[in-house]
Image (cartoon, rainbow, N blue to C red):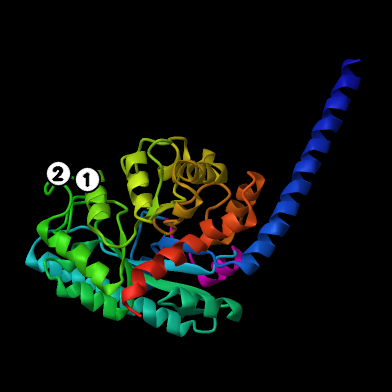
């Protein structure tokens, strides 16, 4: 009798696995189809370091970002950030940071030109729509850390003229623009210079990114900016109390101005569990929270790949359709998924750029 019961349980288990496999294959087929129709956007990666400094040793795994991986994962557009680590807040330190950002941005432009059969540089959502049917990937330029501005407001114009569409105003330390989440309180938000930077970014149609900013900085930027702002790669503090994540108060304020919470794919954003136990379901849990709190129009995805990100089931750009599968499994409609993947970013970008064109 025990043997018969074991056989029955084994057959039932095997049947359940077959059903689940069949459902996953069906959902992946739908995901494949969807990614051929809408434009998908990742608002942050750190591949610039590998591209511009290929021989530099790194404690962070590199290789999660490439144009072939974008094609494999159904990702159309990626914001490539010129990353500048925080250094001494001196005239020499600021000049080195500026030169570093300048070198990386010019290197990214050269890289996409060298791979023109695979990718093209975009400056507007209209560029993204034009490039999509060609089958090529799309690069958008951004900067991570306003430290590279020093105290020179004209550098905002310089970087805008170079093609930068978004700037993360700080990183893991205070700079001349604002307080970081990971430093002592100096300005209580923005500095006087930082307020001028926000106004200049508004004037130039450059998107403002408050990832890495302190809560006080985020709230002040949202209040001061004429345009929507975003956090390009973060998690939800209510689900995981990592100070790098955004509180419900910040989410509500950012959304009230038409802005975006872009959910990161780093395990360190999503859960206190070991990295191997953090998966795609955790990414979508954070998406769910933002949707339930402020609506589908205020959420998206910013991976932080090549910057330490990655979870089981989505460890490179080649696996990003797995997020779509989970969204489908939870009942998100095709139109909603299109908003999460790119529609929301393009809408915000068009609003910010309205003064440019």
Instruction: Say which element carries label 1.
Output: helix
Does 335 sit left or right of 111 as displayed?
right
First to last magenta residue range: 61-73
Q: Residue 43 appears at what percent x and percent y?
A: 42, 62
Instruction: Say which element carries label 2.
Output: loop
Within 10 Å of the Cα at label 2, are there few (<14), some (14-19), or many (20+) other Cα atoms? some
The residue depicted at 22 percent of the width and 76 percent of the height is 157
Does 234 sit left or right of 149 as displayed?
right
Q: Nearer the viewer, mark 1 or mark 2?
A: 1
Q: Residue 227 appears at what percent x and percent y?
A: 31, 62
Q: Residue 271 appears at what percent x and percent y?
A: 45, 38
Q: Is residue 47 visible?
A: no
- The tag earlier along the polypeptide, 1 or 2, is 2
68 part of magenta stretch? yes
The residue depicted at 55 percent of the width and 67 percent of the height is 39
166 part of magenta stretch? no
Q: Is residue 200 visible?
A: yes
Within 10 Å of the Cα at label 1, are there few (<14), some (14-19), or many (20+) other Cα atoms? some
In 3D space, how far apart are the residues under numbered discs 1 and 2 (Cα atoms)?
9 Å
Determine whether 152 is above or below 331 in the image: below
Residue designated by label 2: 185
Determine whether 312 is above or below 140 in the image: above
Considering the image in quadrants, where does the C terminus appear? bottom left
**Residue found at the far top of this picture:** 1
**Pick the front one: 77 or 21:** 77
The residue depicted at 27 percent of the width and 62 percent of the height is 226
Q: Residue 238 appears at what percent x and percent y?
A: 40, 35
Determine whether 197 is above or below 309 in the image: below
Residue designated by label 1: 216
Does 320 sit left or right of 309 as displayed?
right
Determine whether label 1 and label 2 are within 8 Å by CB.
Answer: yes
**Residue found at the far left of this picture:** 91
């Amino acid at each position: 009798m025990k043997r018969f019961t074991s056989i029955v349980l084994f057959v039932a288990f095997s049947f359940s696995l077959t059903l689940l496999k069949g459902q996953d294959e069906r959902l992946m087929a739908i995901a494949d189809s969807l990614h051929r129709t809408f434009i998908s956007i990742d608002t942050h990666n750190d591949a610039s370091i590998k591209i511009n400094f290929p021989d530099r040793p790194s404690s962070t795994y590199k290789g999660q970002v490439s144009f072939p991986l974008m094609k494999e994962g159904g990702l159309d557009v990626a914001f490539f950030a010129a990353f500048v680590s925080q250094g001494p807040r001196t005239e020499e330190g600021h000049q080195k940071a500026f030169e570093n950002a300048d070198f990386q941005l010019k290197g990214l432009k050269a890289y996409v030109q060298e791979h023109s059969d695979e990718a093209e540089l975009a400056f507007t959502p209209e560029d993204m729509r034009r490039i999509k049917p060609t089958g090529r990937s799309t690069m958008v330029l951004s900067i991570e850390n306003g430290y590279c501005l020093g105290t020179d407001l004209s550098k905002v114009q310089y970087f805008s003229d170079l093609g930068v569409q978004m700037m993360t105003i700080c990183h893991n330390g205070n700079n001349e623009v604002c307080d970081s989440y990971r430093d002592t309180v100096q300005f209580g938000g923005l500095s006087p210079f930082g307020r001028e930077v926000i106004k200049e970014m508004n004037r130039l149609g450059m998107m403002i990114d408050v990832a890495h900013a302190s809560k006080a900085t985020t709230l002040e930027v949202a209040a001061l900016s004429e345009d929507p702002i975003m956090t390009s790669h973060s998690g939800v503090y209510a689900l995981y109390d990592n100070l790098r994540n955004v509180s419900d108060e910040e989410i509500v304020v950012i959304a009230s101005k038409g802005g975006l919470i872009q959910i990161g794919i780093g395990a360190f954003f999503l859960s206190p569990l070991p990295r191997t136990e953090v998966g795609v379901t955790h990414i979508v849990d954070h998406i769910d929270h933002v949707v339930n709190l402020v609506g589908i129009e205020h959420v998206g995805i910013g991976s932080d790949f090549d910057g330490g990100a990655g979870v089981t089931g989505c460890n490179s750009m080649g696996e990003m359709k797995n997020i779509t599968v989970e969204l489908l499994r939870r009942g998100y409609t095709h139109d909603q998924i299109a908003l999460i993947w790119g529609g929301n970013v393009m809408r915000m970008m068009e609003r910010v750029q309205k003064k440019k064109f």
